[in-house]
Amino acid sequence: MSGFKKMDAKWKKRWLKALRTPADQGGYIQGKGALVQENRSHYVLDGLQHYSAEPVDLFCCLGVLTNLMVEKKCDVGGKAWDSSYMSTKASNIADLGYRARKTVAVMNDNGTSFGEIADWIEVNL
């Protein structure tokens, strides 16, 4: 047993799919330190520097989940991207506890790939 509370199964399934979809196949581009960093023309993907003529948005793993909720018209509380942290409303929608949020945020910001984070979520949440 992982010691983590299980999250809402519907949101878990959507989140895992989004995290496992490669960026070059329509998935999210991973960022660090904020839920989303909008309009970036320079980023690192799979350890390689990328420069884009078209600015892109970079997401942390919790930003991916929050964005999925925004796309489904969920009320995540105010402006979803005003913080480095997932809102309490968004956390409650997914039934995602503080320890789980903190754990995946640290994994993300320490360079753990979306795929590895998805594997951890699948086992532990």
Image (cartoon, rainbow, N blue to C red):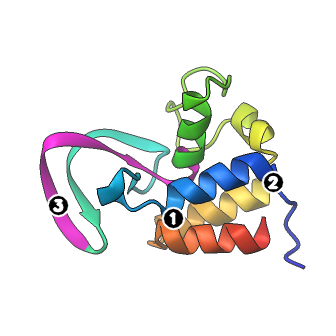
- Tell me what residue is drawn at x 34 percent, y 56 percent: 25
Q: CA distance from mark 3 to mark 2?
A: 34 Å
N-terminal of the two: label 2 or label 1? 2
- Confirm whether the magenta stretch covers residue 55: yes
Q: Are marks 3 and 2 in contact (CB under 8 Å)?
A: no
Q: Are marks 2 and 1 in contact (CB under 8 Å)?
A: no
Q: State the residue in front, 50 or 84.
A: 50
- Tell me what residue is drawn at x 82 percent, y 46 percent: 95
> Does residue 32 lie above or below 3 as drawn?
above
Residue 98, given in percent of the width and then of the height, sits at: 77, 53
User: What is the span of residues highlighted in magenta in the rendered image?
Assistant: 48-63
**Quarter in which the C terminus is drawn:** bottom right
Q: Is residue 55 left or right of residue 57?
A: left
> Does residue 4 lie above or below 41 as drawn?
below
Q: Secondary structure at mark 1?
A: helix
Q: Is residue 78 left or right of residue 31?
A: right
Q: Secondary structure at mark 3?
A: strand
Tag shown at residue 108:
1
Q: Secondary structure at mark 2?
A: loop
The residue carrying pointer 2 sits among few (fewer than 14), some (14 to 19) or many (20 or more) residues within 10 Å by Cα, namely some
N-terminal of the two: label 1 or label 3? 3
The residue type indicated by label 3 comes to His
Circle 3 residue: 50
